[in-house]
Amino acid sequence: MGYQVEKDFVTKAGFRAVICFVHNSHYCGYVGIPKEHILHSKSYSEERPVRLPANEPIGDRGIMPIFLHAMSDVKDHFTRLDCYFNVHGGLTYSGSGDEGYPTKEPNDLWWFGFDCAHDGDATKGKYAHYYPGDVFRDKEYVEAQLESLAQQLKDYKENKVVSIAHDEVEGRKRMDEEDMKQSARDEMNSSVCDAKEAL
């Protein structure tokens, strides 16, 4: 992927952030979190035990991830991370810094990112597109979005009670399924015995 790092800085929340200009077309923004963060090594599309706040507007999130989340069979009290974080177009990237992306040098951070090439975003260069009303998202816009995302990542907390309750319910379901299977086996064995006695 052709890209250049245009800004590498530490956000007010204390996380490293990078602004890249990709394909000479549009900006992307990334926030790196340390190993001790609960979301380190998690995919941006992973379901986590958190809920969107009630009556919260869509905000800057992408409408497609929210729609797909609503149409999926995601468990109650769980939300996909690309829907949870209020950032331009929703999260569209997660990955290790081991390979040196997006910073050009390897690091031990886990990166979450977004891009500015969605419907409503004007782009430049070889991949240029513009429709009336589209807006080119500049570096200052991306920096403000990164500050917001970094603060949301810093404030992120999972609902441990929901997570534990979910695990207990799933465990009970598995036990109930095993009990049902065992009951069916017992009933079948009993029927076989009754049939043998009848002969």
Image (spheres, rainbow, N blue to C red):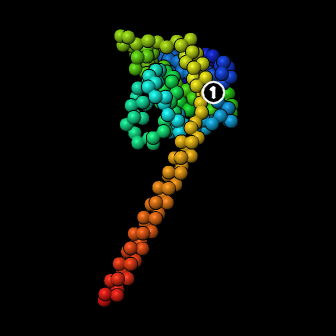
Q: Position of residue 70 (x, y in %)?
A: 39, 34
Name the residue at 56% across, 38% down. 159
Q: So how many labels did they put on this image?
A: 1
* Residue 3 seen in the current view: no
Along the line of sight, the residue nearer the viewer: 56 or 63: 56
Regarding mark 1 in the picture, which secondary structure is present there?
helix
Residue at (59, 33) in percent of width and height: 157
Q: Quadrant of the C terminus?
A: bottom left
Q: Amino acid at mark 1?
A: Lys
The residue closer to the viewer here, 17 or 197, is 197
Is residue 76 in view from this perspective?
Answer: yes
Residue holding disc 1: 154
Q: In which quadrant is the N terminus drawn? A: top right
| Residue lying at the far bottom of the rendered structure | 199
Q: Tell me the quarter of the picture where residue 7 sits.
A: top right
- Residue 175 is situated, as x and y percent measured from the top left of the image, at 49, 60
For image coordinates 58% across by 41% down, the residue present is 160
Front one among 15 and 172: 172
Q: Position of residue 192 (x, y in %)?
A: 36, 80
Asked if residue 78 is positioned above or below residue 144 in the image, the reply reads: below
Question: Is residue 84 shown left or right of residue 155?
Answer: left
Mark 1 burial class by Cα count in 10 Å: few <14, some 14-19, many 20+:
some
Q: Establish if 140 lies above or below 154.
A: above
Q: Residue at x 47, y 63 (%)?
A: 178
Q: Measured from the top left, where is residue 9 in percent x and y?
A: 66, 18
